[in-house]
Amino acid sequence: MSMRLFVSRDAGAVAVGADEVALALEQAAAKRGVTVEIVRTGSRGMYWLEPLVEVATPQGRIAFGPVTEADVPSLLDALASNTPHLLRLGATDEIPWLKRQTRLTFARCGVIDPRSLEDYRAHGGYKGLERALSLGSDAILDEVTASGLRGRGGAGFPTGIKWKTVAQAKADRKFIVCNADEGDSGTFADRMIMEGDPFLVIEGMTTAGITVGATKGYIYIRSEYPHAAEAMNAAIVAAKRGGCLGDRIGGSTYSFDLEVRVGAGAYVCGEETSLLESLEGRRGIVRAKPPLPAHHGLFGKPTVINNVLSFAAIPFILAEGAKAYADFGMGRSRGTMPIQLAGNIRHGGLFETAFGVTLGELVDDIGGGTFTGRPVRAVQVGGPLGAYFPRALFDTPFDYEAFAARDGLIGHGGIVVFDDSVDMRKQARFAMEFCAIESCGKCTPCRIGSTRGVETIEKIINGERVSENLALVEDLCNTMKFGSLCALGGFTPYPVLSALKHFREDFVPAPTTLQAAE
Amino acid sequence: MTAVYEPWDETRGAEIIAEHAKQEGATLVVLHALQEAFGYVPEAAIPMVAQALNLSRAEVHGVFTFYHDFRHKPAGRHVLKLCRAEACQAAGGDALAARAEARLGVSLGNTTADDRVTLEPIYCLGLCATAPSAMLDGRLIGRLDEKRLDALVAEAQR
């Protein structure tokens, strides 16, 4: 008897024992004289079910999870005799959490072997680039623009316009840079796609290269993601060997090469100009804009710098056409967003869906509330620079403009859930503290303001002249918001002000008479 | 598993620098390579990097001190990193960090007196759906709880 099993090698799965489970499966099978082939895939993104084990059957893959080493013998028994098992989840594709999604970018993640170019091709990989090669630069730009794709790193700038600017710039060299410095807490989509479908990122970047006339690209990956860097490097080697990178890509006249560079633990390097400084070998100090990177980017040359998810959306848009992508979404937010559910959440993971789903649906319905079982009190959307939302705003649809209208941002699509034990004063102080730790130091509002912010919130926590200090924090936030050079200093006020606005009761002590009544 | 580093050696250092110096914007690449070999970036290497890259010593020193990853002295035999970012805070990370500090007798960012364990904060390992998370010498651990943390601390102290 021979079996084909799938176990994730995604860092999130490995962190909860996927390697041990894979090894146990191999050893137990060998002991029984059963031949198994264990394919190490990316993750399906259902992290509460990791380590997830899937088995190939004529009817498709059947999933089991979360599997521990101790479950392996009984799991193999159940597989051999085709009998029920407690951890059996049924057909993977029919799991409601997965079935409800619209996976355009993450279609292959968790399905294919991320080390295999053949597997990527067999699942529709490189169809987008093939079409791009036949279209030529102008037509590709039209497609990307018509798709309505906006920068998935958080700023939401239209990708087509960015590419067009670089395409029109005249220079001896141009660059494609992939921002894989995914530092926002609560986000892991970049990591997942790099580990689970790295050729997708390569294909997207290659497409950008042929469109704007760049022959070299860099992927800047944060050092906290060693698994992702390893996966990207392995995929680059395989793509070169397969003729998908290097000279004369796929027999065309285009050349494009890629290199991975690893960051060194600086959150601010996720800001595009700081990232470019870092790639050039300098301190990650933010550059004033203009000039835009599209005109004056890496090494002073015109540069397309996009987030991992932006590049990863490109192959679908080119393979299926702009309309197929733009048909999803709402308003000016077209297509799908890989949303990441994190923190104190029962069903945490990656949920890719069209824009427009509400925050409440995401947290309560899809996320299943908290894993502690306590009521959800606050959710931070968009990373450390994103606002805290109370339940009262759970009707906010996931859309760039809708979040902006409520003084928030969707950022890179991370949602961190907190239960009712959260102390919003501590969260507000942490926002300032994090900014102080990570500030590049170039502009005063961010460098000094963040430290003063920590001190002032500390005073509020200690009950010192609370109303005066609250007014001071609000004033300081305004200075930072409008006076900072980049989003680090400029957006740190979002979590602080939202905590003050929506969770005022945490900052202003209740009247003593009420306390006495308790 | 403890990483094994070479003792600092100028000739070996020069070799490593030369190996990477030709790349465009090589400063971080070179510093990473030095730290990978020696476990830290010795002070003596800074002027060597500067010379090889045609930069001032101040520029290289500036880069070296800007990034949290680079060490000016070796870490303890084991490095335990605890995620201190929001997703892990939401899942009880604060209490676990305090527990690790108490167990090891050092605060975050420091090394135990016997040089066995360096305890460090890290801001997001991207394991936010299986929070809280930690990293022991490069190995990732998710769904951290008191029991798992105590086991990690014991392992690091061995």
Image (cartoon, coloured by chain):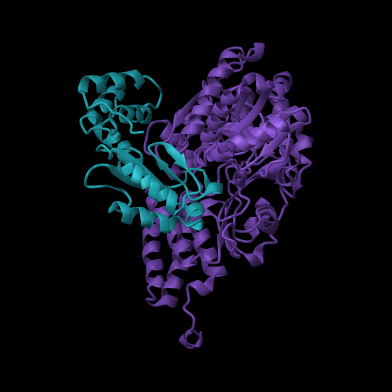
Q: Is residue A427 left or right of residue A71?
A: left
Please indicate, yes or no, whether residue A296 appears anywhere in the rendered image. Answer: no
Determine the residue positioned at 39% across, 45% down. B152
Determine the residue positioned at 43% across, 45% down. B134
Determine the residue positioned at 27% across, 42% down. B116
Question: Closer to the camera, A78 or A173?
Answer: A78
Using the rendered view, name the quadrant where residue A242 is placed.
top right
Chain in purple colour: A
Q: Position of residue A473 (x, y in %)?
A: 44, 67
Question: In the figure, A464 relative to B75: above or below?
Answer: below
Using the rendered view, name the quadrant where residue A39 is placed.
top right
Question: In the figure, A443 relative to A464: above or below?
Answer: above
Q: Position of residue B79 (x, y in %)?
A: 34, 41
Q: Position of residue B80 (x, y in %)?
A: 36, 44
Chain in cyan colour: B
Question: Closer to the camera, B141 or B158?
Answer: B158
Question: Closer to the camera, A347 or A284?
Answer: A347
Q: Position of residue A393 (x, y in %)?
A: 65, 64
